[in-house]
Image (spheres, grey):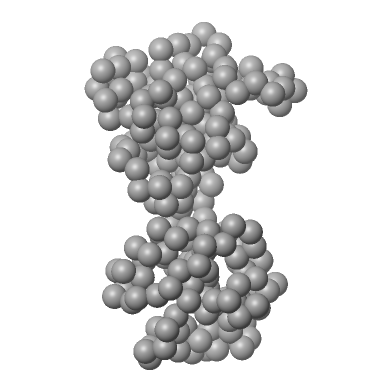
Amino acid sequence: MIRMALTKGRIETGALKILSRAGYDVSELDEDKKGRKLLFRLGGADIEIVLAKAADVITYVERGVCDAGVVGEDTIMECGAELYELLDLNFGKCRFALAGPSDSGDPADIAAAANRFFTGYRHRVIASKYPNVTREYFKSKGMDVEIVKIEGSVELAPLLGLADAIVDIVETGSTLKANGLEVYEDVAPISARLIVNTAAIKMKKAEFDPLIDNIAAAVKADNE
């Protein structure tokens, strides 16, 4: 049997759609059936589904209590876990971006604000829910910045004078614009990924191969 952990919420919904298109019976996970259960068996298949929070999906797969998982690339990047990313599932697309104040939404003003941020020697303070992603990004830039971890609405930090800019997940950018912020630079693309435990994929190769083939075919069909 293969045990697969899904990140609860939007990624769970997207993953179940792919599993359904791949030919698996996911009816036990219908919203009107599942109730508060967190552990399910797919009908007619030796696959067990675990519903968990994103960071816990990483832990379960890394520790080997789950053989595979579906989680956002943002969580993988922040956790820095030793995992094998098997497939880009091509949904849940967004991006990490560096954003900060701009005088207006005019592209010239945004470019000028971004240039001011990246030049000069003034100490920079960055607010983010993702300190590890932020640290690696600025390390690649050769910039030494102070990082402040924020748990809630990170857009508030520049407005309150706590930070010069933020690193956060951006989908449409509408929340940034509503708070007078603009994207200075994209940091990294994000999408849902199928991850596997490196030992499990070797030990359960016969079970994994058809699952991977079916999921890959479903993802490909969605993109055609």
The foreground one among 215 and 134 is 134
The foreground one among 39 and 17 is 39
24 w.r.t. 56: above or below: above
**Image quadrant where residue 154 sits:** bottom right
190 w.r.t. 2: above or below: below
Residue 47, image x, y percentages: 46, 16
- Of all residues, the one furthest to the top in this rendering is 44
Point 52% across, 22% down: residue: 49
Point 65% across, 71% down: residue: 156
- Of all residues, the one furthest to the left in this rendering is 202
Indicate left or right for 34 with 146 as reference: right
- Tell me if residue 221 can be seen: no
The foreground one among 108 and 62 is 62
Residue 208, image x, y percentages: 34, 20
Indicate left or right for 208 with 175 as reference: left
Point 53% across, 24% down: residue: 50
133 w.r.t. 108: above or below: above
Residue 92, image x, y percentages: 53, 47
Point 55% across, 37% down: residue: 53
The foreground one among 207 and 150 is 150
Residue 204, image x, y percentages: 30, 17
**Quadrant occupied by the N terminus:** top left
- Tell me if residue 163 can be seen: yes
